Structures are given as C-alpha cells and as structure tokens.
Image: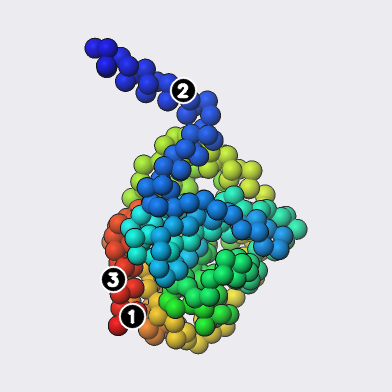
Amino acid sequence: MTLLFTLLLIATCLWVFAEWKPDIASRWGLGLERKRSGLVLKSQAIAGFEIPYLEGGQGEVLVLVHGFGGDKDNFTRMARFLTPHFRVIQPDLPGFGDATRDPAARYRMSDQVERLHAFLQALGVQQVILGGNSMGGFIACEYAARFPEQVKALWLLDAAGTAAAHDSPMLRHYLATGDSPLLLRSQADVAKLIRATMARPPYFPGFLKRTLGARAIVDYPLHCAIFKDLSQHSPMLETQHTTWPTPALIVWGTEDAILNPAAARTQEQLFPRHKTIVMQGIGHLPMLEAPAQTAQDFLEFARTLSV
C-alpha cells in the first residue's frame, strides 16, 4: 500500500508540474526523445539567423528538412533507427521551430535553399543525402537543382512542389478562404492540425500540445504571411526543370489530406532514377506516424546507392 501511495503521489506531482510548467515539461520530454535517438542539440549562426539543429550518429551525412509549421523534432523519433548508420542532421528552418524569426526577411523556397546551403557550409558538410517532408521536400528538390554536386540522393516524404501535389482540398480551401489547418489561431486548432496531418497520429502529451500550440499561435501573423507568399511565388518544379539525375526515394501516405499523393507520378517523371513507396493508411507525416517502417524503407533504398 505504501509503494502504491508513493507511486500515485509521484504521478500526481508530475501531472501538476506538467500542468503548471508545460514548457519545461516539454523540454524534458523532447530531451528524453532526443537522447534515445542519439541526438544532441546544437546551434549554428548564419547571416541574420541562428539555426538550432539536432545531430547524432556517424557516417554519411543525412540532412532532414521539416515542412511548413514543423520543426527539427518532426524526425526525432524516426532518427533512432537512422543514427546507427548515418550522421543525421535535423535543422530548424529560419522562421520555424526555435530558429530566428525576422518579419522583414523573405521565406521563399530560393531563400531557404540559400540559407540551408550557408548552414551546411558552416558545418563543413560537402555532400549529403537530403530528405524533406512537405515544404522541406520542395526545398530539397530545389537544393539538388541548385547544388547538384552536393546531393547524393533525395528522400521525398509527401513532398510539395508540383502542381499535382498542390491540387488538394486543403490548398483549394486555403485559396478560397485564407484558412488552413497549418495556421493556428487558438489551442483548439492543435487538434485540427493533428487530424488534418496524420491518419495514425502517435501519442502527444497534453503539455507538449500546449507548448507547440502556444508557439504556433504567436507565429500566426508571420506564418500567414509566409504561407501567402509561398502560395503566390512558388513556381512548380516541372515548370523550371525537366529531369534530375539525382536518385530519389519518393514516399507518399495514401491518406495525405494536405497534399495530393497523385503527385508521385509527376515526381517519377522528374526523377527517372527513383523508387516509389506508397504507405497504406498513412497521412502527411510518415516519419511521425510510422517511424520504424519509414526508416527501414529508407535504409533499404540507401543500400542500393552504393551498388
């Protein structure tokens, strides 16, 4: 009985602390996830921006770029399957996560490509396998076009950047109303975001949802401006390029409600050296919904690169 009482007391104290200080509880929780994945938090300054990033593992460099409204920790749970094989680097893009926000700066694809390049140059990284989800996938493609000699392969996870991908109910609704589940105005919008982006969401503690929601609410004006700018000034990949020689692993979740999985066909035409994986019952964020399987699919693809 004494042991049970002690455990209940500890659990109650932890719950009260998480309710009282959700930001501190979130840092602790994310810290444990990062440690389990072999990742360490670091930071790198580039012109005008401070870029926090997670790094761990050894070997070839694998850089993972998050999507709109996401951050470096979007890949943390999946990274535990990757750090035994690669040096994994997960940066926050300027304007997102814990990176610098500058309302006077531009955040178009070309701007973020140049910043990502400056970041990798500052780290002394010369060649990478470059992965990206959603907007991050768009940036990865543009990076490979701009710096082809630096990108050994691409890993495109429900990637934006083609007319087919953008032909989705979410983006049509945004163009008609200016409203998107990626733009959060209240804590109630966190649940809408999770429903819209994931068909099989993992467990998110309440304190983490409150912390991330609070950050997104503060970011609402800036992110509205960025989203509008991107929607108006993002030429589609197929209008700028014919094909890439870069090998690409193309991944789509069948239940993606943010972008259109039919874009796989356009991406296959852009990347003749491709492998396509369609994940049944998965939404827009495979690395969060099915981290082990998503990582395993990539590791099998990566083994073919050295054959």
In which quadrant will I find the C terminus? bottom left
Residue nearer the viewer, 267 or 136: 136
Residue type beneath disc 3? Glu
Residue located at (67% from left, 53% from top): 101
Residue nearer the viewer, 70 or 150: 150
Q: Compare marks 3 and 2 and give the one earlier in the sequence.
A: 2
Percent position (x, y) of residue 176?
Answer: 58, 59
Q: Nearer the viewer, mark 1 or mark 2?
A: 1
Instruction: Write down the residue under mark 1.
Output: 306
**Left or right of residue 197, residue 2 in this image:** left
Q: Is residue 15 above or below residue 159?
A: above
Mark 3, Cα crowd under 10 Å, few <14 / some 14-19 / many 20+, is few
Mark 2, Cα crowd under 10 Å, few <14 / some 14-19 / many 20+, is few
Residue located at (39% from left, 57% from top): 79
Spatial distance from mark 1 to mark 2, Cα to Cα? 52 Å
In which quadrant will I find the N terminus? top left
Instruction: Write down the residue under mark 2.
Output: 16
Q: Compare marks 1 and 2 and give the one earlier in the sequence.
A: 2
Instruction: Write down the residue under mark 3.
Output: 300
**Left or right of residue 211, residue 34 in this image:** left
Spatial distance from mark 3 to mark 1, Cα to Cα? 11 Å
Which type of secondary structure does the marked residue at label 3 adopt? helix
Residue nearer the viewer, 80 or 114: 80
Percent position (x, y) of residue 57?
Answer: 41, 60
Q: Is residue 261 above or below residue 51?
A: below
